[in-house]
Image (cartoon, helix red, strand yellow):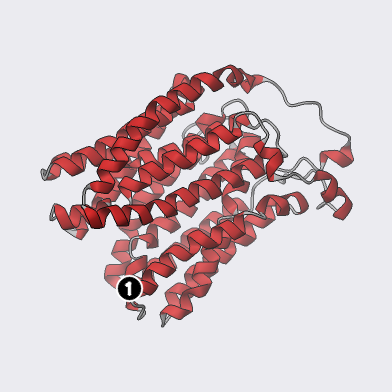
């Protein structure tokens, strides 16, 4: 990985990783701009509460169908073009949401959001290919620190625009952030060394999900990722509702607390980026992130003192830190550029399924007792910590492969089949 001056536009990451950094910055800024008022906008367009929930959950279901073929498409077409096309559809969906006059007109937004998910595994594979021996550091900066900063800043700008021009303004601002990201996505270095593969070459280059799962350590990491994201989401998903209903905290303060969580994610990400020891043991770094979230939940469940809750909310960003670190760990485990898109796609599908399914259980527990989702998450997290540490020790012998070069390149015709 070529690195440059920290003061340059690419923040010392090098030109190619700089493109990835700013592209993901724009993606997360777009998400942060509208996600806080998304339910309000659906309801404002005339949807009953049951429909609001359906619209909110639909992208989580659709993303499974859009992510599944993404790796196969990347084997046939240039991934950079797929990313740009997918995120362009997301941007157009945001524009249509801002122009909508009825909730039924939000269908393009829902579909565009789901299609845009294709960009994540393909971008992760691109980053892994260009990060050299510093993959954990690169993933931490690009997928944790940058997005956390964007997610903290964009709601503030969107809030000012909403105050001036109404809820629609948030979606137009989100679309602008999306088109900003397209500028950098379009500058990614091509993954294929020649023209797009023809049918025969694509068939020869084809990989499968079972092939990716057979890579040593992949199934273990994916299982741990599902468990960790599910357990942390179980406690966090209804935490804003708990604070508003049980602690009497105003919605405005609850929204600000979300920004505090982003600050915590940034600080932890920067610490990891400077700590070679934690980069060498990403599952231990994930264990620390789990402890941070546990602290947030424990303080929120046990006190009404606002300043304590504010400080504790620095740990809420541990969920996003853990997610990003699992992807980084996967990039170290899967050594083949051909298989990484499949592995990252599986990671996105499994992580997303855990994230979107945990609130279902949380809602049932909350109906029994409001603090039960928080307590259940804390208990399950305690059981998870030794598993993470033990698994890291078990996988550690494979980690020194960091500096081992890839096998010799195949002949030119086959080389074009090495697709990120």
Answer with the quarter of the image where residue 318 lies.
Answer: top left
Residue shown at 55% from the left, 22% from the top: 395
Q: Is residue 408 above or below residue 149?
A: above
Q: Is residue 407 above or below residue 211?
A: above
Where disc 1 sits, the SS reads: helix
Please provide percent x and percent y for residue 402.
Answer: 62, 22
Crowd class of label 1 (few under 14; some 14 to 19; many from 20; radius 10 Å): few
- 81 relative to 236 in the view: left or right: right
- 387 relative to 167 in the view: left or right: right
Quadrant of image for the N terminus: top right
Please provide percent x and percent y for residue 37.
Answer: 33, 65
Please provide percent x and percent y for residue 413.
Answer: 88, 41
Residue holding disc 1: 49
Answer with the quarter of the image where residue 262 lies.
Answer: top left
Please provide percent x and percent y for residue 165.
Answer: 32, 73
Res 412 visible:
yes
- 153 relative to 335 in the view: left or right: left
Along the viewing direction, whichever of 383 and 191 lies nearer the viewer: 383
């Amino acid at each position: 990985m070529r690195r440059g001056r920290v003061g340059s536009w690419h923040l010392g990451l090098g030109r190619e990783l700089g493109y990835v950094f700013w592209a993901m910055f724009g993606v997360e800024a777009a998400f942060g701009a509208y996600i806080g008022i998304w339910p309000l906008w659906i309801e404002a367009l005339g949807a009953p509460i049951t429909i609001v929930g359906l619209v909110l959950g639909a992208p989580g279901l659709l993303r499974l169908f859009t992510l599944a073929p993404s790796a196969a498409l990347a084997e046939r077409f240039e991934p950079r073009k797929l990313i740009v096309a997918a995120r362009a559809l997301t941007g157009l969906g945001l524009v249509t949401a801002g122009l909508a006059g009825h909730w039924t007109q939000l269908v393009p937004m829902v579909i565009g959001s789901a299609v845009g998910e294709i960009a994540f595994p393909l971008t992760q594979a691109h980053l892994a290919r260009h990060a050299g021996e510093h993959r954990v550091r690169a993933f931490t900066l690009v997928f944790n620190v940058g997005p956390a900063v964007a997610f903290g800043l964009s709601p503030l700008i969107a809030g000012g625009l909403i105050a001036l021009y109404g809820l629609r303004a948030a979606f137009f601002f989100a679309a602008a952030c999306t088109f900003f990201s397209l500028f950098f996505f379009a500058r990614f270095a091509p993954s294929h060394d020649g023209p797009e593969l023809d049918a025969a070459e694509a068939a020869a280059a084809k990989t499968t999900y079972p092939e990716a799962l057979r890579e040593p350590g992949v199934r273990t990491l994916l299982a741990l990722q599902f468990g960790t994201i599910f357990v942390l989401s179980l406690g966090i998903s209804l935490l804003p509702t708990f604070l508003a209903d049980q602690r009497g905290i105003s919605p405005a303060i609850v929204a600000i607390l979300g920004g505090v969580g982003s600050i915590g994610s940034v600080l932890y990400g920067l610490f990891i980026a400077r700590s070679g020891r934690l980069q060498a043991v990403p599952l231990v770094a994930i264990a620390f992130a789990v402890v941070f979230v546990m602290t947030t939940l424990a303080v929120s469940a046990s006190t009404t003192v606002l300043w304590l809750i504010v400080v504790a909310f620095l740990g809420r960003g541990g969920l996003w830190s853990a997610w990003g670190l699992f992807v980084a760990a996967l990039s170290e485990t899967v050594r083949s550029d051909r298989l990484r898109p499949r592995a990252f796609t599986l990671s996105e599908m499994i992580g997303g399924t855990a994230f979107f399914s945990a609130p279902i259980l949380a809602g049932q527990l909350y109906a029994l007792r409001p603090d039960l989702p928080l307590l259940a998450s804390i208990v399950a997290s305690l059981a998870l910590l030794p598993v993470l540490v033990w698994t890291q020790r078990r996988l550690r012998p494979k980690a020194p492969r960091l500096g081992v070069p890839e096998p010799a390149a195949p002949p030119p015709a086959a080389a074009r089949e090495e697709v990120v």
